Amino acid sequence: MGVKGFVEGGVASIVAGCSTHPLDLIKVRMQLQGESAAPKPDIQALRPALAFQNTTSSQAARAFQAPPVAAAARPGPISVGVMIVRQEGVAALFSGVSATILRQTLYSTTRMGLYDILKQKWTDPGTGTLPLTRKIAAGLMAGGIGAAVGNPADVAMVRMQADGRLPAAERRNYRSVGDAIGRMVREEGVTSLWRGSALTVNRAMLVTASQLASYDQIKETILAKEVMRDGLGTHVTASFAAGFVAAVASNPVDVIKTRVMNMKVQPGCPPPYSGAMDCFLKTVRSEGPMALYKGFIPTISRQGPFTIVLFVTLEQVRKLFKDF
């Protein structure tokens, strides 16, 4: 019974991951927008002149000739997607899909299977019910263990998805997830495979607890109140609501995770971020608190369809495997 839960969850997760991969890639590209801490001395230098403080004539002339301009609006998800297709081709939307398949095989298969086992173990045999708090606890445990198992594939996926935004000379050009993991081990050491693992585990705990627990709770509520019968409509409604909850809960951790995993560490130079907290502080200081919700539109645009495909597929796979 326990093994069946792993297989069902793994199949559903791989189908959902592959079908929503382009949205995930756009999300990663948007989360990395503005990361480069490019100095902006002109605007800083112009402030005294524009405030009519005492300046030299050359400063005044410089202020007149180069007035500050408003920062250009960052492109949205549709613009980012179009840009990727124009600059890198349609196939670029599936950059890193091999890493996605491996990630779902390791991470999602583990978390879905463990969650199913814990649910069965903790369900009250008399009433057949499981309190929401226990569902959340099961999600936290299952998500954390699954993330630790799947972190190498997660790092490879983020890097492969982000590679196209770099100048040609700086790209890693991984051929596949196997090549990515092999080169990381050779060039950066085995520990690089678990870079950002604390963030991955935290994010996975939040996502799994909010996504799986929300789905089960919302589905049970819909059926208990007889709003809809158990079928496709109920599955889609519950899964979309669960996807929204998961996106809101996980986006800030996801932004930091993406940046830490993607950072390039040059030999003899300190890393851009010393850790998750350093990345968090630098991001908020340089880009503001709302930077933690960068990529939220593609996150919810991806999390919604991903969760719908995941649970609709899972319900169908369960029907197929019911007699096994």
Image (tube, rainbow, N blue to C red):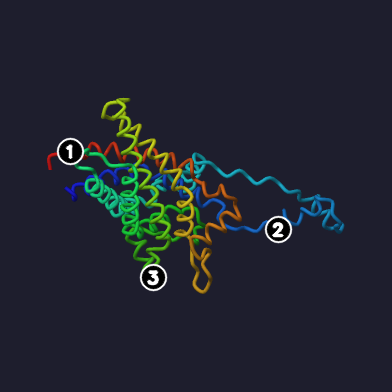
Disc with the residue nearer the chain's start (3 vs 1) = 3
Can you tell which mark lies on residue 32?
none
Label 1 belongs to which residue? 320
Q: Position of residue 202 (x, y in %)?
A: 41, 55
228 vs 310: above or below = above
Q: Amino acid at mark 1?
A: Leu
Disc 3 residue crowd, few under 14, some 14–19, many 20+, Cα 10 Å:
few
Disc 1 residue crowd, few under 14, some 14–19, many 20+, Cα 10 Å:
few
Label 3 belongs to which residue? 189
Q: Position of residue 60 (x, y in %)?
A: 84, 54
Q: Amino acid at mark 3?
A: Gly
Helix, strand or loop at mark 3: loop
Q: Amino acid at mark 2?
A: Pro
Q: Is residue 280 left or right of residue 228?
A: right
Helix, strand or loop at mark 1: helix
Q: Position of residue 110 (x, y in %)?
A: 27, 53
Q: Position of residue 315 (x, y in %)?
A: 25, 37
Residue at position x 41%, y 69% from top? Answer: 188
Camera sees residue 163: no
For the residues marked 1 and 2, what is the alpha-carbon distance in whole angstroms? 63 Å
Instruction: Residue at the far bottom: name it.
Output: 268
Q: Nearer the viewer, residue 273 or 198?
A: 198
- Please tell me in which quadrant of the rendered image residue 247 appears: top left
For the residues marked 3 and 1, what is the alpha-carbon distance in whole angstroms? 43 Å
Label 2 belongs to which residue? 41
